[in-house]
Amino acid sequence: MKTYLVTGGAGFIGSNFVKYMLNKYNETIRLIVLDKLTYAGNLINLESELDKVVFIKGDICDQETIKAVFEKEEIDYVVNFAAESHVDRSIENPQLFMQTNILGTQNLLEISKKNWQIDDDVYKESVRFVQVSTDEVYGSLENEGYFTENTPIRPRSPYSASKASADMIVQAYIETYKYPANITRCSNNYGPFHFPEKLIPLIIKNVLEGRSLPVYGDGTNVRDWLYVKDHCKAIDLVLHKGKQGMVYNVGGHNEKQNIEIVRIIIDIVKNFMVEKPSYQTILKTELSKINYELIRFVKDRKGHDKRYAIDPTRIKCELGWYPETKFEEGIVKTVEWYLENQNWVDSVASGEYKEYYEKMYKGR
Ligand code: NAD
Ligand code: TYD
């Protein structure tokens, strides 16, 4: 039975990955989830999985914690999701991003290397480290062109600079020590369990509450949206079939301007309310007030990247990956998930989710 160390597994993508892997491999894998449970880590995301995984509250920067995990467990795979992930927060407090995203990654690399190495440049069979990175390391595109794996790294925010630095350290381990790793660089994910500070969940939440919908600048910035489950599938493929040392871009060919996203969400919420009037009990505003007049153009983000767009040819041709979920379907499923999971939204909004770890693990 293979053992996976999933860092940051209580966050948005990490928790979706845990569900994806348990569902796909059923009882045939062992998952160790390590997460510091920062404001973005929510153990309620793994409520249905806690009896199927080993959960460790811990920091990837902490040498003793990571050493202890490798001493206790025969880890075959590491998937590193753990990170500070919000660009706006990185503009306010860059240092935390450097600590976790850069030094934390290096700590994981070093300790796993020591545990996996059996001779100079020789590692245990079929061990693998996947660094979950981002297309933001490539910087910003104008209206034309796509990011390929050969696009030069040109990060422009403290967040993307920290992720790019981590990528370069992973690449240094690959080149210097022949360390068995891959890097995935994906576009913006969306789907269930997305923390409502990011565009899509924030807009859904604000629409339901009749609050204004903040759109940075003129709303024409473009993101290339990827349904989170399609991303999880890509990581699983890279872990098991990725060529040693290779970088893989993962993207859904779903480019949308931010303003389009906001309008689409307003339309979908309205449709749900009309087609299924029982949802109207969720509304904290009148149905007639759900319209485009909620949109507010606000001060632009500093250094706001104009456009991201991924060319996923390599992962498609080499590993047969493709994005199964069309944006039109994925965004409806996502809005529906938020409508069906208002308890989750409420526990995040009230901060109650932070108490869940104590409740579950006190005295254990
Ligand atoms: P998230 O913020 O929802 O989750 C991050 C998780 O990491 C949280 O559970 C948090 O508690 C944990 N964490 C933070 N610091 C830690 C530390 N020092 N030690 C252990 N755990 C720590 O982020 P996400 O959106 O799920 O993103 C996961 C990964 O994917 C990140 O590495 C991010 O850079 C990358 N990524 C995300 C997107 C996206 O659209 N969300 C796109 C591209 C890449
Ligand atoms: P975000 O979800 O923070 O992801 P990222 O910055 O990693 O792409 O933002 C997505 C886009 O939406 C980005 O162009 C910034 C914009 N945005 C808004 O216009 N308003 C908001 O309130 C937020 C959070 C983001």
Image: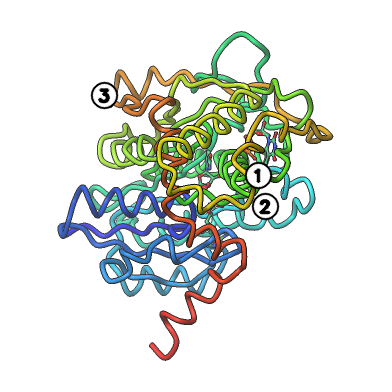
Q: Looking at the image, is mark 2 or mark 1 earlier in the sequence?
A: 2
Q: What residue type is labelled 3?
A: Gly
User: Residue 56's image quarter?
Assistant: bottom left
Q: Which residue occupies the foreground of this view, 338 or 74?
A: 338
How many numbered circles are shown?
A: 3
Please determine whether, in this image, residue 112 is positioned above or below residue 179.
below
Amino acid residing under circle 1: Ser
Residue receiving disc 1: 162
How far across and down, in percent of the image, does residue 334 sit? Answer: 44, 40
Residue 191 placed where, x, y %?
Answer: 45, 42
Q: Say which element carries label 2.
A: helix
Q: Quadrant of the C terminus?
A: bottom left
Residue that mark 3 sits on: 320
Residue at 53 percent across and 57 percent down: it is 345
Residue 97: image tag: 2
Give the residue displayed 39% in from the left and 42% down from the top: 181
What crowding class fits label 3: few (fewer than 14 Cα within 10 Å), some (14-19), or many (20 or more)? few
Which element is circle 1 on?
helix
* Ligand 1 under 8 Å from disc 2 Cβ: no
Q: How crowded is mark 1: few (under 14 residues within 10 Å), some or many (20 or more)?
A: many
| Label 2 to label 1: alpha-carbon separation | 6 Å
Q: Is residue 151 left or right of residue 1?
A: right
Q: Quadrant of residue 158?
A: top right
